[in-house]
Image (cartoon, rainbow, N blue to C red):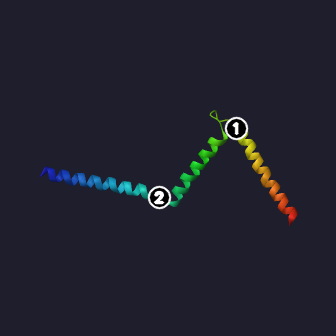
Amino acid sequence: MSSISSLEADIAARRARLADTIDELARRATPQAIVDRQVSAAKARFTAATTDESGAARPEAMAAAALAALAVVALLVWRRKRA
């Protein structure tokens, strides 16, 4: 008889673990959770690309950002003059 109650307890424990796993997967699959993960990954990539190991800004990255900003401003001025 103890083996039957042992099996029942084992089945109940497995069901509980399976339910927890399904809940976790459902939580990870929500659109907001996916967006949060992607935003965190993008921030990490940006930080890695624009700073060195000590956390200081990399001059070449700052120059590229300044050049991109200048290009956007120039494009906006050019479009305004054409209109």
Query: Relative to residue 6, is residue 77 drawn left or right?
Result: right
Q: Which residue is mark 2?
A: 29
Residue closest to the eye, 74 or 57: 74
- In this picture, residue 4 sits left or right of residue 58: left
Extreme residue in the top direction: 54
Out of 77 and 29, give the one closest to the viewer. Answer: 77
**SS class of the residue under badge 1?**
loop
Left or right, 15 with respect to 3, comes to right
CA gap, disc 1 and disc 2 = 36 Å
Task: Please report the residue visible at 64 percent of the width from the left and 33 percent of the height from the top.
Answer: 54
For image coordinates 80% across by 50% down, the residue present is 70
Q: Position of residue 46 (x, y in %)?
A: 63, 45
Query: x and y percent of residue 12 in the render?
Result: 26, 55
Please state which amino acid type lies under the numbered disc 1.
Arg
Residue assigned mark 1: 58
**Viewer-proximal residue among 14 and 9:** 14
Question: Which residue is painted at 73% across and 38% down in the image?
Answer: 59
Q: Of all residues shown, which one is farthest toward the left?
A: 1
Say which label, 1 or 2, has the lower sequence index.
2
Please state, as top left, top right, bottom left or bottom right, where the C terminus lies in the image.
Answer: bottom right
User: What is the x, y in percent for residue 36?
Assistant: 55, 54
Q: Amino acid at mark 2?
A: Ala
Crowd tier of the residue under label 2, counting other residues whose Cα lies within 10 Å: few below 14, some 14–19, many 20 or above: few
